Amino acid sequence: MGVDQEMTARSVGSGDTDVLATPVIVRLVEQAALIALRGWLPPELTTVGTSVQMTHAAPTAVRGLIDVSVWLEPGTDRTLQFGFEADDGMGVVARGTHERVIVDRATFLERAESRRAAAHSRRKHGR
């Protein structure tokens, strides 16, 4: 994938330089994990990201290329552990792990809505 201006630290607000932003690498890792999981879960289930541990060790300039690879590591029945590397053609610029948890889609969305409603009520009543 080509690195463009919208992917820079300056553009996403994570720094003041025009190089590939760390949060963008996280986004690319999550996207790669989702692509790797396509077709493996029934439609009522999905995965949600719960953690990322990453070392971002080298800069990638605008118009550079970035390739993110993910692989599934041993996890549990509900927790999926991915290892990952991001490479810009000169070598690995970032590596780490990404965890995703398998959830029931409807239950997860209901929980999110319940939390939103409770937070709204707390703010409305000054708590």
Image (cartoon, helix red, strand yellow):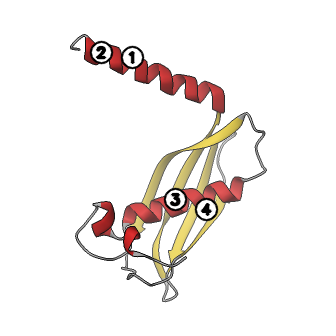
Label 1, secondary structure: give it: helix
Category of crowding for the residue at label 2, using alpha-carbon neighbours closer than 10 angstroms: few (below 14), some (14–19), many (at least 20): few
In the displayed structure, does residue 7 sit left or right of residue 112? left
Label 2, label 3: how far apart the Cα atoms are: 36 Å
From the image, state whether disc 4 or disc 2 is nearer to you.
Answer: 2
Q: Amino acid at mark 4?
A: Ala
The numbered disc on residue 32 is 4
Q: Residue at x 51, y 79 (%)?
A: 2
Residue position for label 2:
122
- Residue type indicated by callout 2: Arg
Whichever of callouts 3 and 1 sits on the residue coming sooner in the sequence is 3
Most distant residue in the top direction: 125
Residue underneath mark 1: 118
Is residue 54 toward the left or the right of residue 103 in the image?
left
Find residue 57 and report its horizontal and vertical position in percent: 37, 75
Q: Position of residue 122 (x, y in %)?
A: 30, 15
Which comes before the other along the chain, label 4 or label 3?
4
Q: Are marks 2 and 3 in contact (CB under 8 Å)?
A: no
Q: Is residue 50 above or below residue 118?
A: below
Residue at mark 3 to residue at mark 1: CA–CA distance: 33 Å
* Mark 4 or mark 2, earlier in chain: 4
Which is more foreground, mark 1 or mark 4? Answer: 1
